[in-house]
Structures are given as C-alpha cells and as structure tokens.
Amino acid sequence: MIIVMKPNASETAITQVVKLIQDNGLETHLSQGKEVTIIGVVGDKNKLVNKNIELMSSVDKIIPVTESYKLTNKKFHPEPSRIKVGNHEIGPDTLTVMAGPCAVETEEQLLTIAREVKKAGAQFVRGGAYKPRTSPYSFQGLEEEGLRYMQEAKKETGLNTICEVISAQAIDAAVKYVDMIQIGARNMQNFQLLREAGQSGLPVLLKRGLAATIDEWLNAAEYIIAEGNPNVVLCERGIRTFETATRNTLDISAVPVIKSKSHLPIIVDPSHATGVWDYVSPLAKAAVACGADGLMIEVHNDPEHALSDGPQSLNFKHFDELMAEMKAYIQLAERKL
Amino acid sequence: MIIVMKPNASETAITQVVKLIQDNGLETHLSQGKEVTIIGVVGDKNKLVNKNIELMSSVDKIIPVTESYKLTNKKFHPEPSRIKVGNHEIGPDTLTVMAGPCAVETEEQLLTIAREVKKAGAQFVRGGAYKPRTSPYSFQGLEEEGLRYMQEAKKETGLNTICEVISAQAIDAAVKYVDMIQIGARNMQNFQLLREAGQSGLPVLLKRGLAATIDEWLNAAEYIIAEGNPNVVLCERGIRTFETATRNTLDISAVPVIKSKSHLPIIVDPSHATGVWDYVSPLAKAAVACGADGLMIEVHNDPEHALSDGPQSLNFKHFDELMAEMKAYIQLAERKL
Amino acid sequence: MIIVMKPNASETAITQVVKLIQDNGLETHLSQGKEVTIIGVVGDKNKLVNKNIELMSSVDKIIPVTESYKLTNKKFHPEPSRIKVGNHEIGPDTLTVMAGPCAVETEEQLLTIAREVKKAGAQFVRGGAYKPRTSPYSFQGLEEEGLRYMQEAKKETGLNTICEVISAQAIDAAVKYVDMIQIGARNMQNFQLLREAGQSGLPVLLKRGLAATIDEWLNAAEYIIAEGNPNVVLCERGIRTFETATRNTLDISAVPVIKSKSHLPIIVDPSHATGVWDYVSPLAKAAVACGADGLMIEVHNDPEHALSDGPQSLNFKHFDELMAEMKAYIQLAERKL
Amino acid sequence: MIIVMKPNASETAITQVVKLIQDNGLETHLSQGKEVTIIGVVGDKNKLVNKNIELMSSVDKIIPVTESYKLTNKKFHPEPSRIKVGNHEIGPDTLTVMAGPCAVETEEQLLTIAREVKKAGAQFVRGGAYKPRTSPYSFQGLEEEGLRYMQEAKKETGLNTICEVISAQAIDAAVKYVDMIQIGARNMQNFQLLREAGQSGLPVLLKRGLAATIDEWLNAAEYIIAEGNPNVVLCERGIRTFETATRNTLDISAVPVIKSKSHLPIIVDPSHATGVWDYVSPLAKAAVACGADGLMIEVHNDPEHALSDGPQSLNFKHFDELMAEMKAYIQLAERKL
C-alpha cells in the first residue's frame, strides 16, 4: 500500500501519518519527491482497515499494490486448476461444451435437446429451471420440476448437468438433481448466495456481472472458495456498454487477462453476450482460439417457439455445423472435447 | 409492437407473419414502404411471448412500443405516490433526508450519530447491519445485533429507521426492528429478494443497479409492487462508467426521467455516487434543485475511523453546514423537511 | 512515479531497475514489503519517457502520482480564473448564460432568437455555422454566411457571440466575426485543431468528449493554453453510457471535480446532455446549485421546424420561464447574471 | 419511420400528424392499438428532416426503421468489397497484416523493423509520423520526415505503407509518400478530415472511435465514400468501458456485426485494444477465427526503449512466433497471407 501526501503536506503531517502506521505494527518507507512525498507501507494492511487514512487532510490518495483476492490468485497457485464434474474435467487439457435451452420447458423438449447436443459432442446439458427475468410478467421457470427433467436427461444420455440457482432453496434442490450449479450475472455480487453456493459442495460456474470488473469477479469467486469449495469455473458472458448492435459486449480479452491473474478455468458464453444466434458461431471459434477452456451455448429444438431467449439460440443444424467446424480449432488449441 | 421485415421479404413471407399473429388472436396493420414493410401488432402481446417472431428468416427486427412495467407506470397512475413511513410521508410535498453511518458499528456510535442527524433535521437514521462487501475479508456487518441498535436509536430520537437487507433472513429480522428496508444496488435484480421484500409489507427503498437501465429499475420495482406492496421509493446512487475521478457517475438526469415515467418517489445518494465526501454537498443541492424527493447521506461521528466507507462520509460539522445551506433550496422546491 | 516489482523479482532485477533510474539522473527510494518491493522515483520523470520500464520482465506496474497537466492544474494556480469575453467576465462571480439555436438557419431566425434571449437575460448568443453531423446527408451549416449573421446579432443586441469551429478555415473565419469559439465534443482530441484554437487568440469553450475522462479533458485544455492562450472555459455536455433514456448521461459531478482539480471555469450544457427539452430546466437548476459557472442552452423560435436538434430546444416561453425560475438559484450561488 | 403517439392522443392530434406527413409528399399507415396509435411513414424521410415531429405534444417518439448510411450498406452492395492497395488486395480472400512501430523514430529503426515484419509475412509496414497524444508534452512524431522514411522502407522491402494523418497538411504530405492513410480513433468524427481523406483518392483505414457505435462508424465511412473514394477499410481497436484491466475493451463482436451490415473489409488492432503485448497473440488468433480480414500489430525492434506505446509492442521474436502460430488459423479461415 502506498500513501501519496498532498503537495503542501507539512513535516508534522507526514510524521503523524508515519506514526499512525507504525503504531499499528507496520513499517513505513518514505520517498520525498520534488512535488510530493509518498509513504510505502509494509506489512498486513488489514491492520489499517478502520483507520481511513484517506480522510486525513494532508493525504492525497491511497494506492493499493496487491490484490485483495488470495485463493483465486495465480501468484499463490501458479498451476491451472482442473475442476472435476462427474466424469469430466474442466481445465487446460479439455474444451468443455455446455449446451442446451435457456429454459427447461418440458421433459420431452429437454430430452430431445440433450440427445442432440450429446451426439454433436457436448459434455454438459444446460437448462434453466429458475429464470431471473427483467419483468415479473415473463416466464419464470419450472423450478424443481425442471431439475427433475435435468436428472432424467443425465440418466438417459450420460451428460453432466448444470442449472442456474437464484436462492438457497434452489441450491438445496439442485444438490439432489444436478452436477454443477451456475450463479448468474445478476447475482454475481449476491454475496449471501455465493456463500451458500460455497457451502453446497457442488462445483460452481460463476458468470461475470454485467458491470463487474475482473477484480470484482475474482473477489466474488473468492467468496465461494473461502467457504471451502475450490471448484469454481468462471464464465465471460458480455458486459454492458454503450453499443446496442449486440445485447452486451463480449469482453474476449477477459480470457487472457484471467489466465494471467488466476488459476481458475474460464469459459465463454457467446449466446448471452450477443443475443443474436448468427454471431454465436464466429465468437465460439474466437473464444477457443484465444485460450478459453470451454463454451456455453444455447441450443433449442425449435428456437422460433422457445419460451425464453429464442433469438439467441442455435437450432440443431446450426449447432452440429458449429461443433464440426470447431474440431480443427480445438485441435490447434491442443485440447480435446 | 412493430415488426420490421427484411428488405427482400417476399409476399409469402409477409403473409406468413401476418397469419401467425392473427392466429394468436391479435390484429395487424400493414405498412408497405419503398424499402421495407412493417407490420403493426394490436392487442395483448403476451400472447406472442413464445413465438420468437425475430427468428423468422424474413423478419429484420421487433420494436416494442409500450413499457413492460404497469404498476409503476405514470401512464396508469398519473398522480405522484406518497409513501407513509412511521410518522413521515415521502412524496412531492416533503424533502426526506436519510442520514447515518454506512455500517452500524456499536450502539454508542449509532446513538451519537442519530442524535446529531436528528438535531440537524433528518427524518431517518440509516445504518447498515448487513453489508455487501466486494471482498469476503472486509467487515460484513453486525447483523441482527445492529438492527437492535437501530430500534434503540428510534426509541431515543423518534427518527424513522432504514436498513439494507441482503437475504430472506435479514428481511425476517428487519420486520421486527426497523421502519423501512433497502434493497442495495448489487441486489437490484435479485428477483427472489425483491419478491420477499414485497411480501414483507415494509416500505422498500430500491437502489438502482450499477449498470441498470431506468427501464430495468422500474421493472425491478414492479416485482415488489406485484406482490401487493405499493410502498416503493427509488434511489439513484450512481452508475458505472469509464470515468474514474468519482467512484460511480451520478446520473442526475434519472430524477426528471423517473418523474416523467413513474409515479414513485425518487431520492438521491451522493455519498455512494461519488465516494468522496467533498463532492456530497454540491450534489445534494443539485438533487434538490432538479426535483428529487429526498437524499440519503452518509454521516459518521469519526469518519477517519469508520469501519466502512469512511472517505465518503460527512462528519457532524459538515452535515450541519449542508443541512443549513439546503434550507433555501428546499424552500425553492416548495417542499418541507 | 512508483514502480511496483513482481512478487518474485530477484535482488539483481531490483538493482537493475534502480540503476537504470539513477543513471538517468533521478533518485530512488526502496520499500521492501513482505509480498512485493516498490521503488519510488524522485525527479523529473520526463527523463524516463523512452525507457519503458513497464516492459522489464521483473516489473509489475508503474503508478503515476502526479498529473500530466500543469497549466490547467489548480495546484499551481489556486485562484479561479476569470475569462474576459467582450464586455463580460466568465468566472466565480457571474453566472454566464449562452443561448441560441443549435444551427444558424437564416439571418431573421438568428436575430429573432438573439433579441429574445437577450431580453430573458442571456449574455451570449450561440449558434452553429459549421455543424458536425453523424450522417453526411444531414444539414451541415451555413459556414461563413452564418458567422456574418452572428456578427449582425451582436451589433443589434450587444450580446457576445460564440460559434463552434471544426477546421483551421473555420477558425480563420471566426476570428473576423465572433467573440469566442467552441471546440465540440467530437473534436476534443483533435489536437491539431486545439493548437490552432490556441494560436487564434480567441477565448475557447472546450466541450468534453463523449468518452473523455476528466484527466484527458484537462490535458486537451493544456494543448490550447500551451500555445499561449489562457482563455479556456470547459463545458460538460454529457458522456456516453449504457443508459438510453437520455441521449447522453450528464456527468454533473464533473462540476465539483473540475473545481477541485483546475482553476478553469466550467459551464454545463443540459440540452445536448439529454436531448430532451423537458429535462433541460431541472438540470439547469441543478448545475447552478452545484457550482457551475454558467449554462449553454438551446433555444429556438420554432423548435418544431428547427433544421437540427429541435427536440432538445426550448421555445421562447420555456426559456423565459427557466430564466425567471433560475434567478433565485443564481442569487443563492452568490453570482450575478 | 414509425411515429408512436402518446396514449391519450386525440383523434384531432392524430389527424394533424397524418396531414403534416401527407402534405410533405409521404404516405401514412395507421395502426390503432388498445393503448397507443402508431403511424407508419412511407417514402423519402429526408422530406421531414426539419419538421421535428417529436416535438408535437401528442407524439411520444419516432422510431427509424432504415439505416442512414447507404454506400457502406450491405443491403445495397451484397458482395464483400476488395480494396486494392499497391500490389495487395484487402478482402475476403486474404489475411492482411499491417505491422510496425507505433511511432517512426529514425530511418534506421523503421528499416530494421520493416525488414523483420516482411520476413515474418506482413504485407504492410505501419508507423506513425503524426502522433495524436493525450498530453502536449508527449512525443508528437517526426511528421514529413517520418513519411520519407516510410517511402524508403517501401523501396527497400516492397512492403505497402500506411500512416496516420491528423490534418489536411498531413494528407497532402502522405499522398506523396505512402500507399494508404489511417484516420485514428480520436478523429473518427472529425468530419472535415474524413472529407479530405475522401478527396485524397488514397485508400483509407478508418479506426473506430473510442465511444462510437457501429452505426456512427459506418456513417463516418459514408463521409469518405460520399466524396467518391470507395476504398475504405474499417479497423476495430477497442472501445471505452468501465473495465481497467485492459486499456480499452476489444469489441470482437464488431467483426460479425460489420460483416452482417456492410460490405467493407474489417481488420482488428489487438495492440491498441489491450495496451499489453502479452494479450496481443491470443486476440490476434481470435480475430482471424471470427472472420476478420486482417490485423494491425505493433512491432518494435526494442520495445523497452520505444518513444511511444512500448508496453503494447511485440518484439521481433514474439512477432515471428505469432505469425508462425497464425498460419494454421489463416488456413482454416480459407485465406492467404
């Protein structure tokens, strides 16, 4: 931590700040520049958490030099994590594909889609049973009934299953039926839910919030891991910007940035990022080419009649073509499906 | 709802869309332009919710013409709402001031602050007992103990009390101790929590999400009101932009925009919007001048030692000065404290 | 300037960085923390401009501690500037109102509007003769002819005149006809134009770029002043965000932020910020209440038939009402029209 | 164009709007819904440009249905354009690589870099002779001297040359020395410069503005083409968002979006988008994988001592590796270098 003093800070003021820090058991290093004096602070900065040094009238600003996340930090865990889910491992050797409808609608619908995405090469079927919707008047999901269909789909196809959870009750139900739970973008800083997801013991897919910085995202993952659950996978799904040609702006750079800051796997969701099925295929290839560990893709048996997010879903033909075209990219990335 | 066809859409394709709409019990109006054909749809568009007309290959885009929120919409409720909380009414005749510490730290601290803000003219004491914090290693709040201190503060000063809730358990506790609950920015689209807040029967202060549009915000309010609880007050607290000179960017225009779209009261929180106590006073005056129904302001007995958000808190002297200076602005706005 | 080394930086690597800095005539101060070592650099950092210390493999990041703008910086010029334009002074004692049409359309139109805004209390008539328009097919302005009408308006009403310039030729023409020139948002980092504006000797109103940080804005002002022209006034006119309810998002906090960082006057343009005439009046009052030195407001004799930006223009009746209502706010701000 | 009336619009008001439109030689189609009436307008909407229908008190909003850009629009030019520059064609069959230093520093530096990027497979050498810099105190470029070095580099290596222009004078000089000119992000809406670039007859690389929507970008291209110069190539180089881990946010989705809206080629600049050389290689591959027509990459002989933007430049070894790794991706995209 570095403290930058104001240009006119007196000797007395500087001494006062130094003393405060030292009285709290930390060391200081003074740099007196021509314009400003800066004070380097050495030691556990949590000891200063309630000191609010920024408010002292002679202090200009505080600059942190280390990240607040530890368990997700690559500095303390240089090897990439491998997250086991059922019979599959998400990590640097595989390219994980999670595919399925935005919302589970009927058992038949889910089974039909699960069979198809299995055939095309996906290792997970995804499907929402609890849907966070902007308007209270939109379809909100089949809840536990939908989770039971997910279990059926697993039984029949052998696919791993993933489902979004939006409450403690949903997590309690999910534990009984699915292999992995998802925290959605709107709940990325629902810290209560993050803790409950950590306590559930299930692997967690943590989507990035619509306006979350990468630092906040890693701190959110830290909440889950701090509960004793290290099985966290990140998912970039677009951030909110001024551009309206796509629903969100896919921050593809998040892939190499996360790779440089964390050991956690990261997958990309081009369906929610763009909201337009036509852009899903080029962006899926881009994600694999730049190092993503996997993809989450919306697939629907009948996108024209989907109860949620139809316009961004691929139909079976398009998904088959995408998976066929991606083979070469997966091979170039030295991964396997 | 308006459907814009692609430039090359055939007669057959247009007929097909028209038929689909009419088969679902709605009327259509056709406009054949030189470049494109557009189809106006008349009737309850919820009948088309699972039709995904956007996916039909001849359709270019769908443009909604009416808002999805109804209960919060000024069109169907032209008079401004008046929300009763304890002995106070939030609405067009009053200027409501909610003041207090970011986090409740001790009983003594809260009582000291409550006495002071009461003396200066505030009608509410605010204080966080459940703190949503970016890092799991930051101070998380006193929880129910903190709520009890709020109740004490009310007993002694007669101030109304407001406290943020972050879970169903927190709401259950809040019902016993405080007058009004707050849904924070990070939970603005935690739809489960919105419904539970609606069911609680307590008046709700709904903060705007960091990247929430005004439409999404009004839809979030709709979730609460749809549970039978019309007592919702909105709070603008800054949105996330590229600018880093302030913690967030206060969207002051949200005040007149909300006034034109909704009947709900709106207050402004300049403390969280900027993160700098020095900017709170000018922005508080600006909020009153442009029609806000109130202010939420962080006040601390000892900002240099606050456990949370010290740099943005006013001390007693600054708060007294602000309240004194605001009097003339409140009078100009034809409101009373 | 502070250099943060990587956690695993060796003694040799640290010594190498220190030596590089000292070899360039600067001093270093070393802080060896538990996790990282930081190196404070004392002296003129321009000596290191081509050293790219960030690229050295042992270096994590560089943190600047002083601003790159000097002539616009309050630290070196603590008193607020007073900019003389014609018979008027823009600064801390006055509230400057610049009003007029987005585009000059005819001489009669401009004279009609000038007479009215003069009567209502404005000290400047504004009007665009060179219009930067998104589409090449939109109306582009009357150019020099429009400037001549501005001169006429001044002769008849005694108002000061201001006009946007978009090229060196436009500046050459403006020098002959108007009192002040404006650099628009889209040209805020057209550095060639900034220099030419500086050389013109005319006072300059510098609008903030749509995505410009406050730091970049002050650096742009620095370009003008560095040419020997200290007569610069800033104008906040909204920044680009995800919100679509207003054309841009008025960053009202920029007013107190600029006041804390610079001695230059700052005015606010609520017309371009929102794009909706209905929101202009509340935001104009907010700007005055939070310390702005003035306002730029679009006024049109016949907004329904304006050639540019009609929907955001006030008609005469609305402008009269606004000026009448603002009187009390101007008095509270201890300014005079 | 569609006009949405307010819910309470009277028959008289609707008739008045319809009459206004018809009096201007356009046709109307009326849709009377339960809540609102909408009026479809058929014909050349430029006839209504100064009517400001939005201001009529009974009108809620105007929704455009067609794009304002025509010459850049894929609807009227379905085949992808092929832009000839010297001996090279930028378009759907090639993968164009423009590489070189951010700023031309010396003749020797430029020649050294040109030889290396030629050897590695690039078809263009890029280098800035006129540098737009945030601070007036940063290095501003060698100007015409730099252009002469570019000409030398072409003579010796046979590479095509591209250089940014920031003024009419720079364009006049560029015409004599280089093959293609670049309009930078900060000048994307410097409409005067766009017109001058169009008149120059040289092929133009048009970078996207930091906060420009894709629609505004295509309109900016329209300015160039409207001057009779169809040789425009677009370049995505990152947009400004709240995320600070990268200098800008690369909007990779712009590639498929542009492909769906325009016939113009689009290349990607991962160096300026991220500001970090380490992220350039993964993003370059991503760009090729999602359909980009080329790449602009900063390469420097000695990034640690570059006069501008060193931290984002690749050194020769890294550039060689990138070009080697990209071969397979270029082949998959069915393009050739």
Image (cartoon, coloured by chain):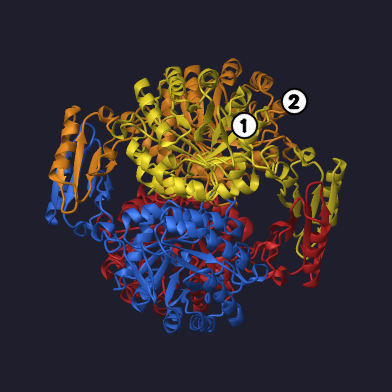
Chain colours: A blue, B red, C orange, D yellow
User: What label sits on residue D231 in the rendered view?
Assistant: 1
Q: Residue furthest top?
A: C176
Q: Are marks 2 and 1 on the same chain?
A: no
Chain letter of the residue beneath label 1 in the structure image: D
Q: From the viewer's perspective, tell me whether residue C26 is left or right of residue C77.
A: left
Cβ atoms at labels 2 and 1 below 8 Å apart: no
Query: In the rendered structure, which amino acid carries the disc numbered 1?
Result: Asn
> What is the CA distance from the residue labelled 2 to the residue labelled 1?
43 Å
Q: From the viewer's perspective, tell me whether residue B16 is left or right of residue D176.
A: right
Query: In the rendered structure, which amino acid carries the disc numbered 2?
Result: Glu
User: Observer-nearest residue: D287 or B322?
Assistant: D287
Mark nearest the camera among 2 and 1 is 1
Q: Mark 2 highlights which residue?
A: C108
- In this view, A47 is above or below D287: below
* Image coordinates for residue A26, horizontal then vertical, percent: 14, 54
User: Observer-nearest residue: C179 or B216?
Assistant: B216
The quadrant holding residue A76 is bottom left
* Image coordinates for residue B320, horizontal then vertical, percent: 36, 53
- In this view, A215 is above or below A313: above
User: What label sits on residue B274 in the rendered view?
Assistant: none
Q: How many residues crowd around disc 2 within 10 Å: few (fewer than 14), some, or many (20 or more)?
A: few
Q: Is residue B155 visible?
A: no
* Image coordinates for residue D73, horizontal then vertical, percent: 68, 42
Circle count: 2
Chain letter of the residue beneath label 2 in the structure image: C
The quadrant holding residue C170 is top right
